[in-house]
Amino acid sequence: MTDPGPSAISPADAAAVAAQLGRPPRGCFSVAHRCQCGLPDVVQTAPRLPDGTPFPTLYYLTCPRATAAAGRLEASGMMAAMTARPATDEELRRAYEAAHLDYLARRDEAARACGVRPLPAGTQSAGGMPARVKCLHALMAHELAVPGANPLGREAADSAGDWWAGGPCV
């Protein structure tokens, strides 16, 4: 698993993520994946903000070009088509359920590494897992951070195109 400890982020990476987000990043985080241009495009965050507020999004897509690509896919109706498939594809259903369990385990590990309380059992994972697809950004971020973990995240990332082709986003 990616080490989410505070020392895992360099000042340059923190500045790049802040520029990508248009605000300083919140909570304990580390770079979970880098774009082909070398900048962070996914960060791993603590499951709680510094004030203790729950923050269930473990993997956060930060590159504005990647997030725009995910948004275009969402607008195209991809989420509805993806949501329907696990009901008729047992292998995909099992793999998507495994992605959900992977996400929960990694989020609990991130809590321990960041020294915060884990989120309560039953807290949602991300992106609608395991029953539906409601956020391609979250599914793509999970798959980019943990290659092979999220089959629908892989499909979305593959469909997003080469968001990095224009060079660094910031």
Image (cartoon, grey):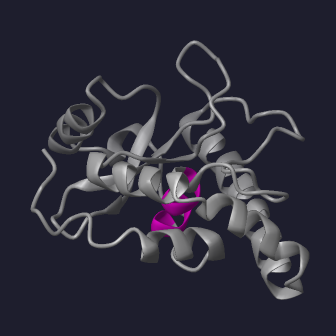
Q: Is residue 32 above or below residue 125?
A: below
**143 inside magenta stretch:** yes
- Place residue 46 in its image quadrant: top right
Q: Residue 137, how many percent across, how many down? A: 51, 52
State whether residue 108 appears in this view. Answer: yes
Q: Main secondary structure of the magenta part?
A: helix
Between 127 and 124, the residue placed more toward the observer is 127
Q: Say which quadrant the C terminus sits in.
A: top left
- Place residue 92 in its image quadrant: bottom right
> Which residue is rendered at x = 79% and y = 42% of the image?
124
Q: Say which quadrant the N terminus sits in.
A: bottom right
> Which residue is rendered at x = 62% and y = 35% of the image?
47
> Which residue is rendered at x = 21% and y = 70% of the image?
36
* Relative side of 50 to 13, left or right: right
Between 23 and 77, the residue placed more toward the observer is 77
Q: Is residue 3 above or below residue 35?
A: above
Q: Which residues are magenta?
A: 138-145
Q: Residue 100, how many percent across, how many down? A: 76, 61
- Place residue 78 in its image quadrant: bottom right
